[in-house]
Image (tube, helix red, strand yellow):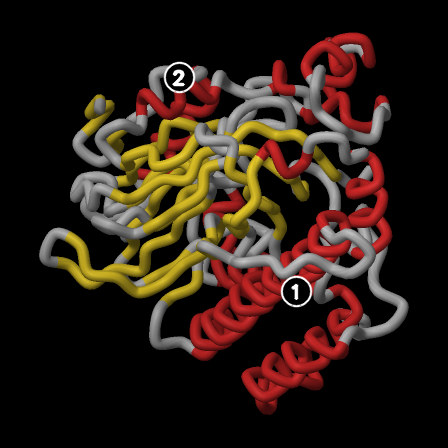
């Protein structure tokens, strides 16, 4: 860990100058206290750095939470191992998952499963009198529950170090979370402009606690975070069902869920750290209380990790959420070829497409370096390697 300044503490050994400067600007906001913690996967983001943990008193910067509110990971450990998969065509499983879970931006369910209807009813109840507002913003949000999206979101079948089979996926609050985030970012910008507040970056616009605008944001944030959690649960239920059919001989196999872990990595909540009650915004970071399980994915062709938090106090009991980008998406598409992607994905069943060049492992930090930087933050329980990868274009 490196103290860049009194208000900026850094765990990233790979940190470019632009990211450093961006984090420094954020750390100097007057309500960021006692310091901003940069995670090992830190990289340039909109307004605030991705891979940052930001404690604030009396205010929240909506862009420092991000537009994919509640984005995170879910994993299920099954009772099966690699020997049980021998002789089975993994492409059949991939195609089955691709049929069960709508992929790509703007793609959603045509009908609602029984489990989705139950989860939607829960979200409608939670929304209360905000429901017409959510419907106005994204009236197809109900049909987005149980959808993956695109970008760095994925579904994978993986093996751990003992060849145990894990089902693993990454997604968030989809279109409705994005719309709500953009709505509140605009309100924060408008208010700061109205109050003649000079910001070092417009995306550091903030909402002040105990105002109607702040309260509305927290209400919508909590709802979108729960949508994201239930979205992952719905997709995982479908993947488990697909895997049961794949492993069955004439009828679905019974899947014994040895463990299920579901964790956010773009979220805000009230927490108590270093003698202070703060709003803690984790933008690309997971909660890593002592003994708390967590999930840290690599890229589409590299290892992912099941971890246990160490409760590191200076990091606000947090850890990285993934590998972190070193190439922007456009830069990656210009730098790498489909042949480079083929080499990176040897031994993994995936949909071969140049659309995924911006997700090639080479566009990310070395996950082994990230995990070494995080050794004071988490303990590795399992190292997962992909055998099936599913992504949206």
Residue 189 appears anywhere in the view: no
Which quadrant of the structure image shows residue 331?
top right
| Residues at marks 2 and 1, CA–CA distance in whole angstroms | 33 Å
Left or right side of 129 for 371: left
**Quadrant occupied by the C terminus:** top right
Left or right side of 299 for 160: left
Left or right side of 7 for 117: right
Which quadrant of the structure image shows residue 245?
bottom right
Nearer to the camera, 199 or 295: 295
Residue at (22%, 24%) from the top-left corner? 1
Label 2 vs 1, first from the N-terminus: 1
Check the image and report above or below for 8 versus 212.
Answer: above
Q: Residues within 10 Å of mark 1 (few under 14, many from 20)?
A: some
The residue to which callout 2 is attached is 369
Q: Residues within 10 Å of mark 2 (few under 14, many from 20)?
A: some
Please tell me whether mark 2 or mark 1 is closer to you in this view. 1
Question: Which residue is situated farthest in the right direction here?
Answer: 110
The residue to which callout 1 is attached is 234
Say which element carries label 2.
helix
Nearer to the camera, 321 or 164: 164
Residue at (81%, 74%) from the top-left corner? 112
């Amino acid at each position: 860990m490196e103290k860049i300044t009194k208000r900026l503490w850094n765990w990233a050994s790979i940190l470019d100058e632009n990211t450093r400067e961006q984090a420094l600007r954020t750390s100097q906001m007057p309500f960021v206290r006692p310091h901003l913690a940069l995670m090992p996967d830190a990289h340039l983001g909109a307004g605030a750095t991705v891979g940052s943990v930001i404690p604030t008193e009396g205010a929240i910067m909506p862009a420092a939470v991000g537009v994919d509110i509640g984005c995170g990971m879910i994993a299920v450990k099954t009772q099966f191992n690699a020997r049980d998969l021998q002789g089975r065509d993994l492409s059949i499983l991939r195609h089955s998952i691709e049929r069960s879970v709508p992929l790509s931006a703007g793609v959603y369910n045509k009908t609602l499963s029984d489990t989705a209807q139950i989860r939607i009813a829960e979200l409608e109840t939670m929304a209360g009198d905000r429901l017409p507002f959510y419907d106005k913003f994204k009236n197809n949000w109900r049909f987005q529950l149980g959808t993956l999206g695109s970008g760095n979101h994925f579904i994978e079948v993986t093996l751990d170090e003992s060849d145990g089979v894990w089902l693993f996926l990454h997604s968030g609050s989809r279109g409705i979370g994005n719309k709500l985030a953009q709505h509140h970012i605009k309100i924060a910008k408008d208010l700061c402009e109205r109050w003649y507040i000079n910001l070092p970056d417009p995306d550091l616009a903030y909402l002040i606690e105990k105002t109607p605008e702040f309260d509305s944001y927290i209400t919508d944030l909590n709802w979108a975070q729960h949508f994201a959690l239930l979205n992952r649960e719905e997709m995982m239920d479908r993947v488990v069902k697909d895997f049961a059919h794949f492993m069955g001989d004439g009828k679905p196999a019974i899947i014994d869920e040895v463990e299920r872990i579901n964790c956010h990595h773009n979220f805000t909540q009230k927490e108590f750290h270093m003698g202070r009650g703060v709003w803690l915004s984790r933008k690309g970071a997971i909660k890593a209380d002592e003994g708390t399980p967590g999930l840290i994915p690599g890229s589409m062709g590299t290892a992912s990790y099941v971890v246990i938090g160490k409760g590191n106090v200076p990091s606000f009991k947090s850890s990285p959420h993934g590998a972190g980008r070193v190439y922007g998406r456009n830069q990656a598409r210009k730098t790498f070829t489909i042949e480079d992607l083929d080499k990176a994905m040897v031994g993994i069943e995936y949909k071969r497409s140049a659309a995924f060049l911006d997700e090639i492992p080479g566009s990310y930090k070395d996950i082994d370096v990230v995990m070494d930087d995080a050794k004071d933050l988490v303990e590795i329980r399992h190292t997962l390697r992909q055998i099936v990868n599913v992504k949206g274009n």
